[in-house]
Image: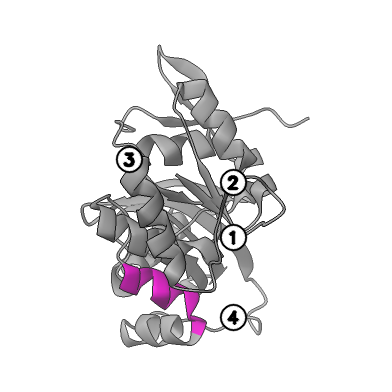
Amino acid sequence: MILASKAVDAQPYTAVASKLGIAAVLGTGDSSQPFLSLNFAQRESALDIVQYASEHPLSAMVAVDEAAAPACARAAGMLGLRWHPPRAADACADKNLLREKLGAAGIITFSLAPAAERYACGVAAIAQAGKLRVLGVVPMESQPAAERSLVFQTVRRAVHAAGLSYGPVSARLEVAGEKVSILDLAPVIPVAFEDQLHFRIPLVDDDVSLCEVVLRHALGMDISRVYRRQVPAR
């Protein structure tokens, strides 16, 4: 099941499901669309998903945007599907609580605006079994290797502090020398990253999208041989 506030935002995932030959159902808060209609602002939406699954068994769940994440976490937990814990999804949705958790772990959560050499970036990753597989940095990595290592270490610490454990993760950061600030952390990867991160599976598929990586992981498929590929600038 693919959960999205707006049906249009789920199109990259439904396209991947079609490519992989997987039957996908869309749960959306967009009442104008003929799909499973859900109100993500209410916790009962998770029960609606479970009720649907009682008649239409689900193999995996993916949340496209952060509004759908708490319902995805609760429904997945009730159905025995692997995803982030509800407490972690709730913590990421409540930005004050998120800052408290990250601050308690010694992670900077405020803007480094006074620093003249700062720059902003986003990180897309997959969490699994206490480990974090970084898929890429947006914009493209251009910072020194030492700074990239510091960014990845900080994101890993933030993921652990928030309790995220299985599935997609994205972080919005500011970097200034040896200082890294986590401005936001989410249990989803923005669809906007889709055009900037491209992948391949050697000898299998040279055109693997970011959404396909996320969906493959949700389905329990092996993504260890998925590698980032560079796309020439147009």
* Residue at the image point whose x is 34% and y is 64% from the top: 74
Q: Which residue is mark 3?
A: 57
* Residue at the image point whose x is 48% and y is 56% from the top: 188
Q: Which residue is mark 2?
A: 35
Q: Quadrant of residue 223?
A: top left
List x then y, in percent, for residue 140.
60, 46
Q: Which tag, 1 or 3, sits closer to the chain's start?
A: 3
Of circles 3 and 4, which is in front? 3
Looking at the image, the residue that sits furthest to the front is: 55
Q: Which tag, 4 or 1, sits closer to the chain's start?
A: 4
Of circles 1 and 3, which is in front? 3
Q: Quadrant of residue 152?
A: bottom left
Picture disc at residue 112: 4
What is the quadrant of the C terminus in the image?
top right
| Relative to 188, 196 lies left or right | right
Range of residues picked out in magenta: 86-95
- Residue 30 visible in image: yes
